[in-house]
Amino acid sequence: MNTQRSIRIATLAAAMSSLALAGCVVAPAQSPYVRYEPIMVAPPPPQYEVVRVAPQPGYIWIGGYWGWNGRAHNWVPGRWEAPRAGYRWAPHRWEAHGKEWRERPGHWELQGR
């Protein structure tokens, strides 16, 4: 009986450890340009968004934008985000290159850049 209890405790400890580690993710730095295929369709004008009250003081509103799903533009709604010390938010934008368009995703960048 003592052995079974030890096995249960060890199994529970292993399960809790894996749950704790599941939230630890290191994301690689993103390239400022993620769309390399030519997009020949200009994005529509931005949609009007109702900006609600921030969930906490100091939060930053990240405005919505038109994304590209491989066939058409799709609206990605805005959201509130906690500020990051020493960084500022560079908004999502589309850049025209001749008749083609390139999508530049929004990202956090060091202040002063």
Image (cartoon, rainbow, N blue to C red):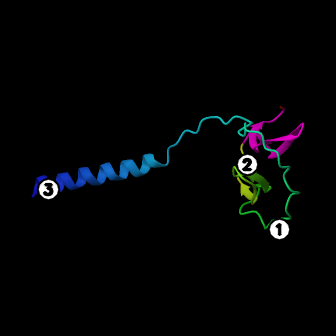
Residue extending furthest left? 1
Position of residue 41 measured from the top left corner of the image (x, y, whole percent): 83, 49
Q: Which mark is residue 83?
A: 2
Circle nearer the viewer, 1 or 3:
1
Q: Earlier in the sequence, mark 2 or mark 1?
A: 1
Callouts 3 and 2 close, C-beta under 8 Å = no
Quarter of image, res 5? bottom left
Q: Looking at the magenta stretch, what is its main secondary structure?
A: strand
Position of residue 20 measured from the top left corner of the image (x, y, whole percent): 43, 49
Label 1, label 3: how many angstroms apart (C-alpha)? 57 Å
Say which element carries label 2.
loop
Position of residue 108 measured from the top left corner of the image (x, y, whole percent): 74, 41
Determine which residue is flagged by label 1: 50
Determine which residue is flagged by label 3: 4
Q: Which residue is painted at 83% across and 65% down in the image?
A: 49
Q: Is residue 99 magenta?
A: yes
Position of residue 66 measured from the top left corner of the image (x, y, whole percent): 79, 54
Classify 103 as above or below 65.
above
- Work out which quarter of the rendered image holds the N terminus and state it: bottom left
Amino acid type, residue under disc 1 in the picture: Val
Say which element carries label 1.
loop
Q: Residues within 10 Å of mark 2 (few under 14, many from 20)?
A: some
Amino acid type, residue under disc 2 in the picture: Pro
Write down the region rendered in magenta: 85-112
